[in-house]
Amino acid sequence: MTRAPFLLVDAGNSRIKWALADADGTMPDTGVFGHGRADDDHPDRSVSAEPAWQALSGRPTGAWISNVAGAAAGARLDALIDAAWPGLPRTTIRALAHQCGVTNGYPEPARLGSDRWAAMIGARVAFPGEDLLIATLGTATTLEALRADGMFTGGLIAPGWSLMMRSLGEHTAQLPTLAAHAVREPAGATDAGEWFATDTPHAISAGSLLAQAALIERAWHELTRAWKRPVRLVLGGGAADAVARALSVPCTRHDSLVLVGLARIAADGSE
């Protein structure tokens, strides 16, 4: 008898990624949708199911959710899930001291973001037995140092590329407010002349992008020096394409670490 899949939901600050995952971790159905902030103006409006979920056949065994977008986003997710599968059991994960082979280095484990925790579990699934530096490039840029034995030794958090650009516009009198989708970076720039800009939007874009790359490269070099062994740099998130092109160190792309981690957590909890 084939077991029904798990519904996995990664609710980030900018968007929601989801997948249906089988017990072996394969994800036959995936998707992305926005937070639908406009619904907040009409709290009495009934919530219809996410259209992609309506098209799915069968009913998942349950939902495993990482939500760092806040209580309102969590309530809307609950409504969307109930509209598609009324009464579906669900688990909103929290970082633990130890789970699925990963040990949390935080003195208070629950203070670590659930997305960072799930991403580390997913990274251990994707790259078993390797020392890793995991860079997630979203609204915030987060870096996690994960040893091959599963020990999370610590991390870094900085404003993301788009947030850096927006902050400059909001807190300076004469600089424009930019968003990542509205700018271009010099892809594959090979010398300083290709980075230094002759217009303000390009200068903001390139400066903020190089700040991201410099942070990641410095962290990778420091970790490699401290651990005295090779460290795989893994990049994911909405700004990963742009930042990867700006890096001068090797990296591996993986854009679904949180979902892979949720799948591992779901499988472990259902055994």
Image (cartoon, rainbow, N blue to C red):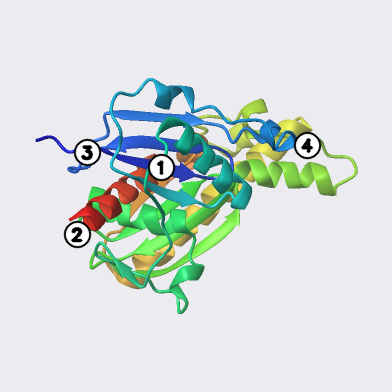
**Is residue 115 rendered to the left or right of residue 163?**
left
Tell me, yes or no, whether the two marked residues, 1 and 3, touch with CB atoms within 8 Å: no
* Quadrant in the rendering for residue 102: bottom left
- Distance from Cα at disc 3 to Cα at disc 4: 43 Å
Q: CA distance from mark 1 to mark 3?
A: 20 Å
How packed is label 4: few (under 14 Cα within 10 Å), some, or many (20 or more)? some
Q: Earlier in the sequence, mark 4 or mark 2?
A: 2
Where does label 1 land, which residue? 87
Whichever of labels 1 and 4 marks the residue nearer the N terminus, that label is 1
Does 3 sit above or below residue 71? Answer: above
Labelled pair 3, 4 in contact (Cβ < 8 Å): no
Report the amino acid beneath label 1: Gly
Residue 244, x across and y down, in percent:
45, 39
Give the spatial CA distance, label 3 vs label 2: 24 Å
State the residue position of label 2: 129
Earlier residue among tags 1 and 3: 3
- Residue at left 31%, top 70%? 98
Q: Check disc 3 and report the residue beneath it.
A: 22
User: x%, y% of residue 141?
Assistant: 54, 51
Q: Nearer the viewer, residue 118 or 43?
A: 43
Pinpoint residue 202: horizontal percent, then vertical percent: 70, 32
Tell how many labels.
Answer: 4
Q: Which residue is mark 4?
A: 177
Mark 3: which amino acid?
Asp
